[in-house]
Amino acid sequence: MFKSLDSKQLKKSLLAVGLGAALAVTGTVAQAGKLGIGATATQEEIAGWDIDIRSDGMGLPEGKGTVEAGEGQYEALCATCHGLFGEGEGRWPVLAGGQDTLTEERPTKTVGSYWPYASTLYDYIRRAMPFTAPRSLSDQQVYDITAYVLYLNEVIDEDFVLTKDNLAKIEMPNQENFFVDPRPDVKNARCMKNCADPKKMQIAGTLRGITPVGHFVEGADAPAASHDAQMEQERHKEKVRKATLKGETVAAHGAAAGGSLSEAAMAGKSTYEGACKVCHGSGLTGSPKVGDMDAWSGRIKQGMPVMVQHAIKGFTGDTGVMPPKGGRVDLSDKQVEQAVAYMVESSK
Ligand code: HEC
Ligand code: HEC
């Protein structure tokens, strides 16, 4: 429908148009003149922003794509994060599989198991992927790769030719579970009486590696950071129980997990799992994999202070780029230091 801009053109037009475009797009073209700032956006500039695709396919560009052409491109541009079969590397999103998991406590929501419309997939890939270079793909590439992701989900066969006209007609497996809520609007009035005192509220349950832990109240019922500690304690109890049966003794808790971790390393484990494992668990983007002694021995020789500085400030070495604090600037220096201790001690 629209002739889309390539990313260089788009960047230029964004710089040139700025606020003017925002006002113009919302339909108040006259305001730009009235306020005396910006310039009226041209049709071409608006087209650069107006890229949404509706569930009925409106907005799709001319073109078509094939599974065969998509395969190589997917493998080159997407598989490092999403896995060769869409299974997801490390903690990057899973794109395929997960059928029949939607009623489970932790459902695997993928394009095939969850998404209601194939058009969303085209829109999403064109708009946002690859993660590090959004809007770098041509319409042709997006058609091919969309076809391939649908194929990975067994929604289409390998010889299917995806076109502007048939894309929106594809029936997604979970489509019928999306419907307009038929219940009447009860027009509930907000109750603001007998409210709890916010100061006395505490968050008690957490999800490991997902719930942010910065704001937890010290000493609250089950603060997040202690989730891992609790798990360790359970494991330790189990070990003692087994050892007692065999008549052995076990070192005090703390030295128990993973053999002989220092206190700092034990404390760093949850930070590692939440913030560093995404790369260091698998060696993604050239990072030294935890547990791989060869990858770590040279680095360990530099001494802890250097490694900790590299982890806090970020650094570029021979194998890749370590972002400052792994991209998690909300972590304290101490948390990063403890995570490094955990990583190093687990790799000797
Ligand atoms: C550097 C890692 C990386 C690469 C490479 C990458 N993605 Fe993603 N992808 C992500 C992340 C992170 C998200 C989640 C983004 C969010 O939720 O804001 C995501 C989300 C998605 C989703 C939505 C998943 C869902 O169920 O919500 C799709 C579809 C997708 N990517 C497709 C692709 C395709 C196709 C490519 C290749 C052209 C690609 N990605 C390349 C990291 C990546
Ligand atoms: C986006 C991926 C990524 C994340 C997330 C990440 N790292 Fe790294 N890290 C790297 C890469 C890549 C290197 C290797 C850089 C090189 O030597 O070229 C590296 C190297 C390191 C090193 C070795 C430094 C040296 O002097 O050799 C340490 C220590 C480290 N990371 C700690 C951490 C900690 C702690 C976290 C979590 C808070 C973390 N990293 C999160 C990618 C990551």
Image: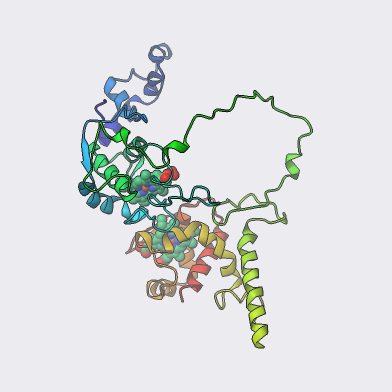
Q: Left of 161 or right of it: where is 326?
A: right
- Which residue of the protein is positioned furthest toward the bottom in this rendering? 247
Would you place residue 294 above or below residue 194 in this image? below
Q: Tell me what residue is drawn at x 47 percent, y 35 percent.
A: 178
Q: Residue at x 70, y 55 (%)?
A: 218
Q: Locate residue 71 relative to residue 300 in the image: left or right.
A: left
Coordinates of residue 143 in the picture (x, y in percent): 25, 40
Ligand 2 found in image quarter: bottom left
> In the image, residue 136 lies at what x, y percent?
28, 41
Residue 130 x/y as whole percent: 33, 46
Image location (x, y in percent) of residue 31: 42, 13
Q: Quadrant of the N terminus?
A: top left
Q: Is residue 248 visible?
A: no
The quarter of the displayed image where residue 294 is located: bottom left
Numbered label tally: 0
Is 191 placed above or below 273 here? above
Residue 326 appears anywhere in the view = yes
State left or right for residue 146 relative to residue 108. left
| Residue at image point 36% right, 23% down | 21
Outermost residue toward the right in this view: 194
Q: Quadrant of residue 11?
A: top left
Classify 328 as above or below 237. Answer: above
Relative side of 220 to 97, left or right: right
Scheme of colours in the image: rainbow
